[in-house]
Image: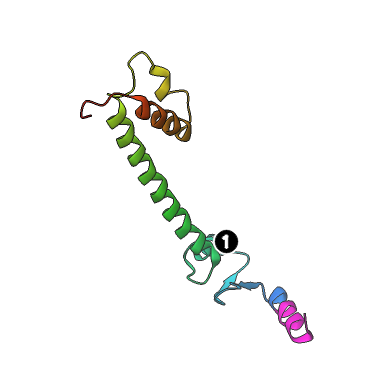
Amino acid sequence: MDDIERAARVAEALSGFTSCAFCGAEFSRDNDAERIRAHIETCPKHPMGELKDKIVTLQRLVDSYDREMTGIRNALRGIIPEHDPTMLRVYSPSERVAILVHQLRNAKMPWG
C-alpha cells in the first residue's frame, strides 16, 4: 500500500463515510447499514451479484434434474417389480439408475 492509498484510507476513516470497493458508491457508516446491505445485493460490480446469479442457475438445474428423475421414476414404475418397494426409497438416485439399468438388461420387454 503506497502513501496515497494509505492517506485515502485515513481520510475515509475520519470522514464517517465508507464506499463500495467495487463501484465507489458512498455511505454513512453510522446510519446506512440497511442501505449498504441493499447496495451489496444490487451493485452490478459486486461479486455477490454474480454469485446470486450462479445460485439461481444451479437451482434451475437442480429443479430440472428433479423433474427428469420424477419422469424417469414414473415411467419405470411398471417395470420395477411390485414386490420391491424399497427400490424407490432406500437407494440414492445414481444407485437406482444402476440397478434399473441392470434390471432392464435382464427384463423381458413386451415389445421384444
Q: Quick one: 110 or 20, which is closer to the camera?
A: 110
Tag 1: residue type? Ala
Residue at x 78% of width, y 84% of height: 2
Give how far across and how far down residue 100 sits, in percent. Answer: 39, 29
On whether residue 6 falls in the magenta region, the answer is yes
Q: Quick one: 88 or 25, which is closer to the camera?
A: 88
- Which colour assignment does the render follow? rainbow
Dot 1: element: helix
Residue found farthest to the front: 112
Residue found farthest to the left: 111
On whether residue 9 falls in the magenta region, the answer is yes
Residue found farthest to the bottom: 4
Give how far across and how far down residue 101 sits, in percent. Answer: 39, 32
Quadrant in the rendering for residue 7:
bottom right
Compared to residue 40, the image places residue 64 above or below, namely: above
Quadrant in the rendering for residue 89:
top left
Residue under label 1? 33
- The answer to whether residue 73 is left or right of residue 14 is left
Residue at x 49% of width, y 63% of height: 50
- The answer to whether residue 60 is left or right of residue 44 is left
The magenta-colored residue range is 1-11
Q: In the picture, which quadrant includes the C terminus?
A: top left
